[in-house]
Image (cartoon, rainbow, N blue to C red):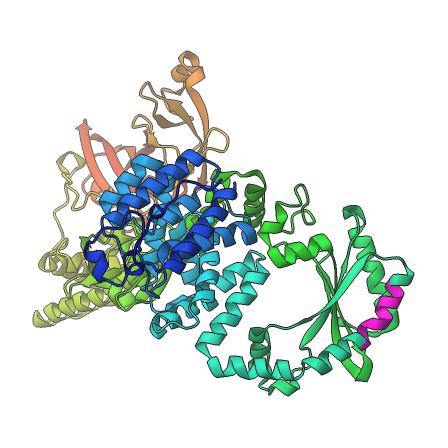
Amino acid sequence: MMPHSFLAQKRKVTKASIHYFTPQKTQLMATKKLLTASERDHILALLRQVYKDENICPNRALVRKVKNFLEEAFESGVALRDAFELAKVETLLETMLLASAEIGLRGEVFLGALLSAVVVDEAHREKARILFGDAVADVLDAFDRIALLRSTSTEVMKTDNFRNLFIAQAKDMRLVLFQIARSVNWMRRIKGTSNVEEQHRLSLEAAHLYAPLAHKLGLYTLKRELEDLSLKYLEHDVYYHIKEKLNATRESRDAYIEQFTAPIRQLLDAEGFSYHMKGRTKSIHSIWQKMKKQKCEFERVYDLFAIRIILDVPLEKEKEQCWKVFSMITDLYESNLKRLRDWLTVPKSNGYESLHITVLGPEDKWVEVQIRTERMDDVAEHGLAAHWRYKGVRSSGGTVDSWLADIRSALETGDEALLSNSLTTQVKAKNVYVFSPKGDLYRLPAGATVLDFAYLIHTGLGNKCTGAYINGRNVSIRQELHSGEAVEIMTSSTQTPKMEWTNFVVSSHARSKIRASVKELQARQGVLARELLERKLKNRKIEWDETILNRLVRKLGFKEGNDFYVALTDGRLDVNKVIEQYVDISAYDAGTAERAPLHKASEYDFTPDIEAQSKQAEDVLVIDQNLKGIEFQMAPCCAPVYGDDVFGFVTISGGIKIHRSSCPNAPALRERFGYRIVKARWAGKGGSKYPITLRVVGNDDLGILHNITSIISKEAKIMLRSVNIDSNDNLFSGIITLMVDDTQVLQQVIKKIATVRGVKSVTRT
């Protein structure tokens, strides 16, 4: 029984007044959007088919809700036609039937598709969400995102990036399948449209977006139709030229096919095979592609057709029988094994299974023969729709792309959740796709920021980037990007790259460009700082000496000259004070420096110029067995240094303190808190410096402390931090704090201090 009509009740009306549902003389009457009588009758017929298809309408109560929603929307004045002046609901109903029959699609995607004809604003969308639930509303949102992509330039549509963006924006594999069916239906309907511009755009979408997707999904019949129709609209003369040539040669081609297949039929009949055979002419699009590739005329394309042998055999005997037929044909005709295609053993990623061989037929013509079974042919022709008809059948293990296997499984089981997540999880997790102001499409890794995008376009743009406009909204350089966004980079001439930017970009390209740009900037600044220092020395008539400068750099605690010049540039060092120290070292080397009066140790006072606490890199400790990256602190009681034998102690707060194994507190810790002791060892050196203290005891002679500190100052890898002296009865006891790299450096300086005349002992505290 037919459902309560979605259309107007049957009553006498003039042809001019017929339109959707309860017709009213509103402004719709003046818009040429009213439906004709034939359109209304066709829609009624389509509705009957839709209502009978349980895949499309499993829930009759929901259908009534949709009917009421559509009636209200049309009475409110919503547009009834699309850009081709086709009735929206009519084309959507046709697409629903096509998607169900050809692809095997089902579920709420159909409801969302039908509602998309009338949901035109937020009020409609919110009402739809309340009436039909979040799932249907999400489908409506996806249709909106896809519609926005149609404003993209046709050149961008030809790229793989655009296909990936399309899938990411759909977020639901059912939408991708439905859009393929919708494209096929549109292409069938727009032959005589006056909107040539929109026809051209739709044809490009079909050729570069939907046909490749249909091919990947194994929807070969739909793929061929999309390719041929797009060629018909985009290159009209080429299409009809090839079509006429095919028609002109059909009779001779059919005669040759009969001549070629006759002996094969005799062999198959003699062996008792159940089969049928057909000659299949290449599609017009395929012939045109071959003509372009080979740069030849139609007459020089020799493989215009293929012979297909389709066997009716049980599933368990498919491969065996296919190979048997292969053997019979290659015995009959000479074969070219270089052109053997074995998609029985290893099916294509989209599930295609067949055995192809090229043989030399009568008149010395090469002919392709395709051998497959009824099941394989059904899958090859109808792709996904065929798979749920062969439940439990799979291609050879592991050969089908995992996402395609998920789609098939979902179609077979009706698993809506699996189908809605089957494709986007792979594409979305890896990349995002964004547009430049010119409409160019760029791919970036997931989580990419505005700054990643700026550096992808051009290094100079990244260096000057201060933020961006995303869909008209002002955002910072840290803003994460999402697929489909239009991003316009903002710059400033005063902006410079900073090393901390590497902390929030995610692409290795941006990270490497930032590091290189910062290094280049510092080098330029270093040149300017060096020129400044040279100029000031020259003005004071002081000779430049690279050796003296290098000693000064080390004395000031810098490992590299570039760091020293950067400190001059940003004001951390006063250039005049640096020059004074340079002069002091120069005078000392020349023997013209005023000798500082010698003092006893008890009179010595030391205040360091620089507190060397910064670390350029952390040394690596392994806590317990293989645990790296755990936060820890060096215990102040024993001040461990890289290379010391150490252990870890878990404190009350949960942190770990590292002690030397010879720490004075070690015995008590092991005895009382053995369960909180963890093993620790050094696993990698990163360049850190550690504070250690030395106790030096010696005679309180004149100049002894001067001699000790001179030894320390000459060591490139040691910095003096503090000196505390206590003197009694012409003996002194001093506590010297140093910053050292590791135990090896420490042992060397201890040996040197011990050689100073008057020093009685040097021990590490």
Judging depth in this view, the residue of 132 and 163 nearest the camera is: 132
Could you say where residue 132 lies in the image, as x and y percent from the top left? 35, 37
* The stretch drawn in magenta includes residue 411: no
Quadrant hosting residue 706:
top left
Judging depth in this view, the residue of 484 and 636 nearest the camera is: 484
Whether residue 507 is visible here, answered yes or no, is no
Could you say where residue 312 lies in the image, as x and y percent from the top left? 78, 54
Q: Is residue 135 toward the left or the right of residue 298 in the image?
A: left
* The stretch drawn in magenta includes residue 262: yes
Q: Is residue 168 toward the left or the right of residue 728 in the image?
A: right
Q: Is residue 381 toward the left or the right of residue 746 in the image?
A: right
Q: Residue at x 44, y 58 (%)?
A: 182
Give the residues in magenta.
Answer: 259-268
Q: Is residue 750 toward the left or the right of residue 727 in the image?
A: right
- Which residue is the extreme one toward the right? 270
Instruction: Judge whether 289 appears above or below 79 on screen.
Output: below
Judging depth in this view, the residue of 333 and 514 nearest the camera is: 333
Number of callouts: 0
Instruction: Judge whether 220 appears above or below 693 on screen.
Output: below
State whether the magenta stretch is mostly helix, strand or loop: helix
Could you say where residue 567 lies in the image, as x and y percent from the top left? 18, 56
Whether residue 404 is visible here, answered yes or no, is yes
